Image: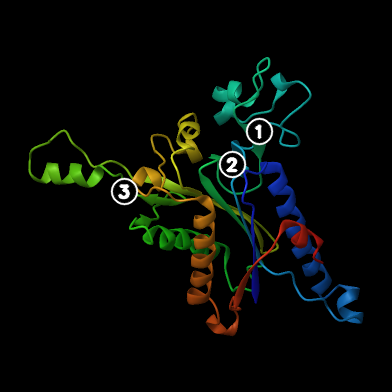
Amino acid sequence: MRLAHLHLPHTTPFAHVSAIQQALTTRFLEHKKLSSPASQFSLNAALPPPPDPTIITFTPNPVYTTGRRDLPPSNTSPQGPDPSTLSLPPPLEPIRSLLTPSGSRPPKAEYHPTLRGGQTTFHGPGQMVAYTILDLKRLNLSPRCHIRVLENSVIDLLKLYGVKGFTTEDPGVWVADADADAGADAEKMGSGSDLKSKLPKKITAVGVHLRRNISSFGIGLNVTEEPMWFFRQIVACGLEGREVTSLEGLGVRGLGVDQVADQFVDTFVRRVNQDFAGKNGIGEKIEEVYPVMEEDLMRAE
């Protein structure tokens, strides 16, 4: 099996990436329909090969997105002709002014409802977003295993920079607060009874959508501190009192999103091949990753 990697090197409108993702998932679903036992095509002609699994990595313009648990009252079209009528879910009502223009001032961020799992989060400059469009059956991945592969791929990537990531009962990938260990040591020495180890901070959001075992959406990994102001305006992922951080915030400086995108694809492929390829003779191994340009990917049939 070959895996296509589409990396969009410049800041890209979220709606544009969503359209690419939708075109790819439709292609996968159409192939599934052709290969179903009821399909006349499968009875009368040779079935074309399935589409290659694809990972899209990108950085969008500042955008708040909601998952299925935080959809607005009307999720058909969030933006009407009058900005004051923008349909927002309750978690985003307090920042309506950031999402609507005021005079000649454009909005600071866009809003897009999505069908991924989870609640409200932010994507934007300083963040590497990766969407995985895959047929989970070919890879022998259950929905839960798919989430675990995404999380473990991020944890493996963080390890490259000496950062220990982990999962909790809450979704996503987390890291210890930079001051937590020092606070814990002070408590042990009895020299700071008022110091308490801080809660972990979230460095990566995870949210996916599945239809007939075709996955879409994926992860958002904070590379620099640039997204932090936007996160502070909301209760990210509905987790009151929990903070977010970035690789830069943990002392890893000078990283670019392009570099982190390539590393995520590498760790994802290693995880799939290590944990699932060939298990029970079902999961296919990813033999090759090839870069693809947007125009070539959208032309492929």
In this view, 23 is above or below 178: below
- Of circles 2 and 3, the one toward us is 3
Q: Position of residue 121 (x, y in %)?
A: 54, 40
In the figure, is residue 192 to the left or right of 53?
Answer: left
Location of residue 119 (image quadrant):
top right
Q: Nearer the viewer, residue 19 or 284?
A: 19
What residue lies at 19% left-to-right and 41% top-to-bottom?
183
For this orientation, the residue located farthest to the left is: 190
Which residue corresponds to mark 3?
Answer: 176
> How many residues crowd around disc 1 within 10 Å: few (fewer than 14), some, or many (20 or more)?
many
Label 2 and label 1: CA atoms lie apart by: 9 Å
Element under disc 2: helix
Residue type highlighted by circle 3: Ala
Sequence-first disc among 2 and 3 = 2
Which residue corresponds to mark 1?
Answer: 72
Q: Nearer the viewer, residue 49 or 297?
A: 297
Sequence-first disc among 3 and 1 = 1
Q: Nearer the viewer, residue 3 or 168?
A: 3
For this orientation, the residue located farthest to the bottom is: 281
For this orientation, the residue located farthest to the top is: 103
Residue type highlighted by circle 1: Pro
- Location of the N terminus (image quadrant): bottom right
Q: Nearer the viewer, residue 42 or 229?
A: 229
Which residue corresponds to mark 2?
Answer: 69
What residue lies at 45% left-to-right and 62% top-to-bottom?
152
Residue type highlighted by circle 2: Arg
Location of residue 177 (image quadrant):
top left
